[in-house]
Image (cartoon, helix red, strand yellow):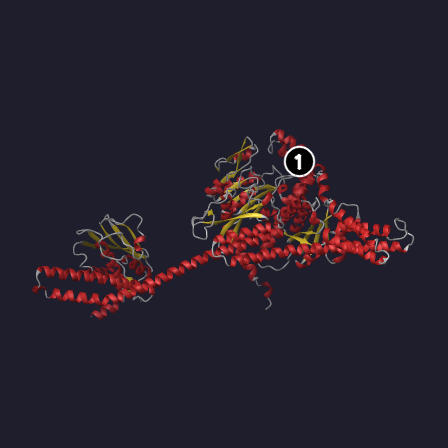
Amino acid sequence: MPHDHQRPDPDALLAQLREQDRRAARGRLRIYFGASAGVGKTYAMLQEARKLQRDGAAPLVGVIETHGRTETARLLDGLDLLPRRRIDYRGKTLDEFDLDAALARAPGVILVDELAHSNAPGSRHPKRWQDVEELLAAGIDVLTTINVQHLESLNDVVGGIAGIRVAETVPDRVFDSADEIVMVDLTADALLARLKEGKVYQPQQAERAAGNFFKKGNLIALRELALRRTADRVEGDVRAWREAQSIDAIWKTGAGLLVCLGPGSHAEHVVRSSARMASQLGTGWHAVYVETARLGKLPEAARARIMNTLKLAHSLGATTAVLSGEDIAASTLDYARDHNLSRIALGRDGSRWPWRRRTARRLARLAPGMDLIEIGQPAVPPAAVNSTTAAAAAAPPHQPLLPHAWAAGASLLTALVATPLRPWLDLANIVMLFLLVVLLVAMRFGRAPSVTATCVGVASFDFFFVPPRFDFAVSDVQYLITFAVMLAVGLITGHLTAGLRFQARVAAQRERRVRALYEFARELSGALAASQVFESSRAVIQNAFGARATLLVPAADERLGMPPADDGSAPGTAPGNVDLGIAQWAYDHAQPAGLGTDTLPACPLFYLPLVAPMRTRGVLAIEPEGGRWVLIPEQRRQLDALAALAAIALERVHYVEVAQAALVNMESERLRNSLLAALSHDLRTPLTALVGLSESLLRGEPALPDKSLALAQALHDEAMRMGTLVANLLDMARIESGEVRFNLEWQALEEVIGSALRACSAALRQHTVTVRLPPGMPLVRFDAVLIERVLCNLVENAAKYTPAGSRIEIAALARGDWVDVTVSDNGPGLRAGSEEAIFEKFTRGERESALPGVGLGLAICRAIVGAHGGAIRACASTLGGAGFVFSLPAGSPPELDLLSMETNDA
């Protein structure tokens, strides 16, 4: 087929539909984007709000910063303003955006100025852009503003241009995920003119700004950055549109980008530059850190900085990983090949020594066909970087002296032990002894002590064994070759042994992680209660991460609490260090919160929701021992895997309990129905005989005295009543077993009401019955026998629970697609709150009563009406007593053939 290349990709269409469903449930985000303060972003946003108001919408102004600009403040007149929330902080009162009030108001559109603003301590989120994300998740459209210098990937570039580093930044993913970007542009000259006129800042602030940030060169460069960033976004929109339209022509694809990070102080600059590069290329990117044996011994502060750099890369959209190996270039290249990445970026080393730049050279030699990109050092003001701190971070880790002392002592001890053996051992064998010591030191202490052992060994061999002895002078030049070979072999042996030792340690760590997951999954497979899942989770997190864990599960009201005990007793209270409010937020939003996250990071605990396939099943509150919590990506993925296993186990436990309860209910219902059927069948024969005998006595009533006649009548009435009870039992058993087949026909309601009243004439002897049927009632399709049973049960129920002389009314009404039939009385009415309970089987209107009955009449009514596609309910009647209304579908009755009827009549 010639046009197959234009056929849409089914997977792409499915992904597009899923994305559309996700976006339909979220609010829309419009960002007013500019190069600098004063270009008119807030003004343009308020103009849009007033336009929406004129169009009939009701936008809510959540927070607006006018900075004293009268033109901007004038636009607020007539708009709905949300009161600010006051926060006391260090003796000052701060006015902040009230997120909870905005969510409670649930407006269609809300204005939230200054997206990069940092919230006051004590707020739910540290950043305002996180407040905006929660508003969007609640389905609220948001209008907001941001300047180019507040984008995370451009932060250091703006710092190099303007000489000022902006502390408040927004991740680029927030900017890229916006539904609409509105570029508010102004030339540098026009902006400076506005600054002089006092339309940007107050006079004192304007003077300071003109001397620092607001310089023409700075404004031109910032404008270029903003225009380029907007152009990148527009290009992304074009690509998305082409993909949505399945247009294959002119794809601007770029090869994947891999960023190799190191422990240096410029790693964050490398990450931000790589993020911009990946955005310009329109491709995904990866960031890896290769941990060697030497880097594995970095101090805790340096490792935390590396993890923070990886976290920054992840927030900018990178896929991060921590690799282990002795050869940084080879490990990086293997990762690039596994993920089909053809570009590798790494930071430029400013060292003058060529050996410090060996990683780039090895990459160029191992992969000549791969593009290598060197990212220059950041152009930041000198005061912005603490050179002492940077040097300390880049310096190799401090090595303790004790292993070197052991290494030197081992070599000297070897020399002392081998000295008495000199007459029996050749010098070559003595050299082997020294190399054996180097190997053992490398296995025990690592690479650097093995170098010490090699050097001390060579010196000891020269001093103790090479003539002239006890002197470092060498009489034979050949011994110099021996020294050189011995030194080289010792260094190589120590290096290889230390590398193998490091690889063995890494493999052992991976094996422990895999074993922990396997054992955890095996333990959870046999868990039958939430408390067992908690015990297993607590043990594995304690062993794997050195942290204490508490499992919180939701109750019936969706509030979190401790799981119940195995014996069914009430659950205990959560530990005092667990904040149930934060845990509830993590549960409700299915997002981590607390320590190490962007939501309440000052909290000492990490709250991880247990998200199962069907729903969130609980929250793990994890408290690190000692207060430190630095997770490398592999450890975080392991923790997420443990949480997923626990969530699935909790979901399985829940459905096991549901299945057991359903099985018990099914068995009890089956047993009850079998018992009802057996009783009703066995009782029908003697009851029929009793009814027949009583009727025989009544037919011969002239020969009976008055007292005997009354007894015969009572016997007949009680036999008939018991026959009705048995019939109800049998009908209920047949309905629930599915044996009842309906004979549905179009019939008139007045006929079935009349037949029901005739059947209940004995029960209605002492009551007044009124029937109200409006003229022109339509035909209704139902089973006449069963609907008659419904009316009989309702009428007899009314007669049973009302005193003699009470009124009973039967009324019908056509209501659209339904026909309502009401049976009401003026008796004592229903007990409050029993309107639904009385339709349950074996439930009576009065718990203790001398009135006969087993409580099946109304249950049979609901079953029959429900089988007809209708509904029945209890209510207070207009007569002052109880009322029962059942509704049947009206349907469309067939048209009568009048000509055929006239012919038949003739």
Q: In this view, does 439 lie to the left or right of 183?
A: right
The residue type indicated by label 1 comes to Phe
Q: Is residue 379 visible?
A: no
Q: Position of residue 673 (x, y in %)?
A: 32, 63
Q: In the structure shown, which secondary structural element does the residue marked by tag 1 occupy? A: loop
Picture quadrant where residue 37 is located:
top right
Q: Please report the residue visible at 92 percent of the width from the left and 52 percent of the height from the top.
A: 475
Q: Where is residue 612 in the image (x, y as percent from the top left)?
A: 51, 55
Q: Position of residue 696 (x, y in %)?
A: 13, 67
| Residue where numbered disc 1 is placed | 213
Please name whichever residue, 249 or 667, is drawn nearer the observer in this view of the structure.
667
Q: Position of residue 820 (x, y in %)?
A: 29, 55
Q: Is residue 584 visible?
A: yes
Please name whichever residue, 805 or 274, is drawn nearer the observer in this view of the structure.
805
Please name whichever residue, 853 or 83, is drawn nearer the observer in this view of the structure.
853
- Establish if 309 lies above or below 485: above
